[in-house]
Amino acid sequence: MDGVFERVANFSVKDYDLEATLNSGQAFRWEKTADGWEGVINGRWARLSQKGQWIRAEVTHPVQDWSWLRDYLQLDCNIEGIVATFPDDPPMTRATRACHGLRLLRQDPWECLASFILSSSKQIRHIRELIRALSKQRGKRITVPEGRPPWFSFPTPEAIAADHEEALRQLKLGFRAPYLLEAARYVSSGQLNLEALFSLPLEQARAELMRLSGVGFKIADCVLLFAYGFHSAFPIDVWMIKSLQANYFGGKRVPLKELQAFAENHFGSHRDYAQQYLFHYQRMGNSPE
DNA sequence: AGCCAGGATGCGC
DNA sequence: GCGCATCATGGC
């Protein structure tokens, strides 16, 4: 790729729904404006918008190689092939049709881990507010175009690790404060090597994440989905419990263990995407947002 | 007022 | 092994 340096790029896309993708509970910093979606990728401000078959990206620093953005947005994934692996049953078909174009992002592991530690027992809009406040208080101010409100990078593990539980509690993190602090100290000290998880099998990567207090099966699988791209991760939260029970168990209550076993067997080799489609479809129905 | 939110943990049984 | 209370906060 030897293009020229540009601040704007346009990408031809097929079967891509940018709004659904940025607003489906996998990333928490994207904000809708009159001109698209503003957010931060790899510590830099970006604005994304979509018109039909085109996604437009605007950044503050001239870029020659846009592969980082193609990777983040997963522009090159074969969504048709993935959808073809879904089970051929009515609920899955409904969700697939309703969420056409929804993708899984490929996010930074630390930001994703920290974000989902904070997500515990919180509504999505509260998670967004928490992360906005945390970034403002502990991140660095970054360059934005003239006239745009200030933006801050997501705080590094080092910045959090140097902090104190009580100070974090004042940012309204609640019982999540010690969890985030421990995670930051594990990562910044090298006790947990997030880069190394890319080359581990799913079960080992999951076990590594679950060494952290405050990280159980569900949060671990969210990170394995949204940052690492493990195809067999299948986080089950309250929305997925509702979805699975309503669609596959006649509305009856089912123990979590049983739901996990069902998901493991039923949703095929791309459970990652099947999960996100069911989740988003469930949340569209009676969305609190 | 009580219940719920992209949960996890520690306790009693 | 299971169910249950508890953790902190905000919105309905």
Image (cartoon, coloured by chain):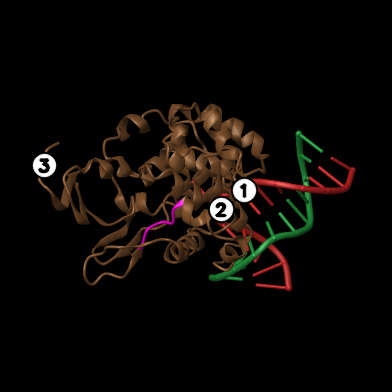
Chain colours: A brown, B red, C green
Q: Are dots 3 and 2 on a single chain?
A: yes
Circle 2 packing at 10 Å, graded few (<14), some (14-19), many (20+), is many
Give percent across and percent down for residue A126: 51, 63
Mark number for residue A180? 2
Give percent across and percent down for residue A5: 12, 48
- The residue located at (47%, 56%) in the rendering is A159
Q: Which residues are magenta?
A: A152-156
Residue that carries the numbered disc 1 in the rendered image: A214
Give how far apart the Cα atoms at labels 3 and 2 are. Answer: 40 Å
Give percent across and percent down for residue A42: 33, 50
- The residue located at (39%, 40%) in the rendering is A96
Give the side of residue A121 with respect to residue A132, left or right.
right
Which amino acid does the dot numbered 1 rest on?
Gly
Q: Nearer the viewer, mark 1 or mark 2?
A: 2
Please say if the residues under marks 1 and 2 sit with CB atoms less than 8 Å apart.
yes
Secondary structure of the residue carrying numbered label 3: loop
Which amino acid does the dot numbered 2 rest on?
Leu
Does A154 lie within the magenta span?
Answer: yes
Q: Quadrant of residue A274?
A: top left
Number of on-image labels? 3
Mark number for residue A3? 3
